[in-house]
Amino acid sequence: MADQKNILYTHDIYIRTIVPECLINFFNLDFEIVEIDSAKEKFVKDFPIRTVPSIITAGGRKFFEQQAVNDYLIGLSGNKKEMALLLGDGDNLDHRTEITMITSFSGSDYLNVLAAYAKPYLGMLPYNKEAEDIALEKLANMHRFYEEKLANQQFLTGDHITLADLVTATSMKLGFAVTYGKEWRAEHKALSDWFDRVIHSKYLETHFKNFKWTDSPAALP
Ligand SMILES: N[C@@H](CCC(=O)N[C@@H](CS)C(=O)NCC(=O)O)C(=O)O
């Protein structure tokens, strides 16, 4: 049976729900934002795979996976100018593909490695030195990739913000909130300045207006 309202399932501890929530706010889309803890039974019934973000439309269509959800919400806005800015212009295949590539990479591989590194500092995973060293090496490589992109341009795929910037910056939130202290930021100035620009952009400001950077890496609990 069709639902009455468009629903975005979310949870405030999670990262992948930040961009969808911000897009709903930015485009003023008619969605109810539902915390999964307050609607456990319905959420599990609607999405037996149990991951967020996930949406169910008023007409009963169900979509999950951050990439698909973001794409859908931007498309639903009907705002052609913003669609071209955020997702890339259909006539520029290279640019559009680069946006998709970075969006997918940052919302999966990068975030998974960063979460594995940061979670022991939040008491969410047991600490393991060997696993940390592997994660740090992978992260250093990944940060180099982003820094090369930012060497000659303001944002990851050019001189305006795209979905690639929004997803990458939100994925990095865990780092800047927990482990990337002042020293790290001085060594990664371009990346830190870019993060600051993106989180305080018109797209993400609703979520990040009170964002607190960590001064120094969190200690293990
Ligand atoms: N590939 C999915 C991953 C979704 C995912 O793992 N979401 C996390 C929150 S950021 C989640 O729902 N975790 C709960 C769980 O896996 O049970 C995507 O990109 O959306």
Image (cartoon, rainbow, N blue to C red):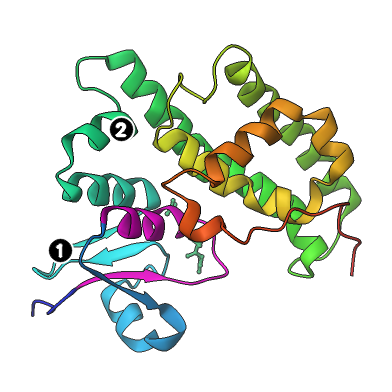
* Crowd rating for badge 1 (residues with CA inside 10 Å; few <14, some 14–19, many 20+): few
Quadrant of the image containing the C terminus: bottom right
Expressed as whole percent of the image width and height from the top left, the position of residue 186 reads 84, 32
Q: What residue is drawn where x is 82% and y is 62%?
A: 121
- The one nearer the camera, 9 or 18, is 18
Q: Quadrant of residue 52?
A: bottom left
Which residue is label 1 attached to?
61
Expressed as whole percent of the image width and height from the top left, the position of residue 5 reads 16, 75
Look at label 1 and name its amino acid.
Arg
In the image, residue 196 sits, relative to residue 157, either above or below, namely below
Is 197 inside the magenta-drawn segment? no
Residue 87: mark in rendering: 2
Is 17 inside the magenta-drawn segment? yes
In the image, residue 24 sits, relative to residue 141, either above or below, namely below
Element at label 2? helix
Q: Nearer the viewer, mark 2 or mark 1?
A: 2
Relative to 118, is 40 on the left or the right? left
- The one nearer the camera, 57 or 181, is 181
Element at label 1? loop
The magenta span reads 6-27
- The one nearer the camera, 92 or 28, is 28
Identify the mark nearer the N-term, 2 or 1: 1
